[in-house]
Image (cartoon, rainbow, N blue to C red):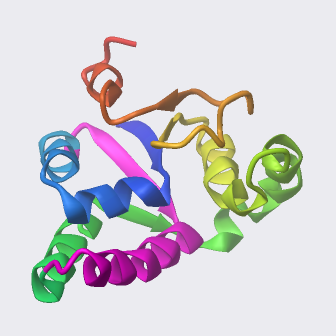
Amino acid sequence: MRPLVLDANILIRAVLGSRVRRILREHYESTAFHLPEPAFAEASRHIGAIVAKHGLNQETSSRHLKASAAFVDVVPLPDYAAYEKDALRRVAFRDPDDWPALATALLLKAPIWTEDRDFFGTGVATWTTSNVEVYLRGED
């Protein structure tokens, strides 16, 4: 199985739209999707506010979050804690709060699926939703 680390914003997109949910569903048998525990908590916090702000259905959003999370391995801090210092050194110039995703990627020797630029220049490959299926199909 190919590993892929998800940034919190990908889980948020899975709740708010159908494309990410489709990608997770179609590729979970060949790809191990990983999300560090703090990113799951962050996504859960932001989803509530986003759903309320846009007047979306809370129940439907909760259902989408649970369905998407079923395809994702939530990685606990002790698993990637040894990579914290290196990850912080690499990402501190952008957003130090992103270190858990980067540390997880370093641990797993995996790319990161994200929609922001915080991981660019950190030495880890990044994929956006617009092109992640290239990686998922093994065309990278």
Hey, which quadrant is residue 78 in on the image? bottom right
Q: Is residue 120 above or below residue 42?
A: above
The structure residue drawn at horizontal position 71% and vertical position 63%, both measured from the top left corner, is 97
Quadrant in which residue 23 is drawn: top left
Q: Quadrant of the N terminus?
A: top left
| Of residues 57 and 96, the one drawn nearer to the viewer in this rendering | 57
133 relative position to 77: left or right: left
Give left or right: position of 38 versus 132: right
Question: What span is colored magenta in the figure?
Answer: 28-56
Residue at x 74% of width, y 33% of height: 122
Asked whether 67 or 18 is in front, the reply is 18
Q: Is residue 6 left or right of residue 118?
A: left
Q: Residue 131 versus residue 31: which sits nearer the camera?
A: 131
Closest to the observer, 103 or 32: 103
Q: Residue at x 61, y 44 (%)?
A: 105
Q: Position of residue 125 (x, y in %)?
A: 58, 27
Question: Is-magenta flag for residue 86?
Answer: no
How far across and down, in percent of the image, does residue 20 sit?
Answer: 22, 48
- Compared with 125, 83 (above or below) is below
Q: Residue furthest top?
A: 139
| Residue 35 is covered by the magenta coloring | yes
Q: Residue 132 is drawn in which quadrant?
A: top left
Report x, y in % for residue 67: 17, 70
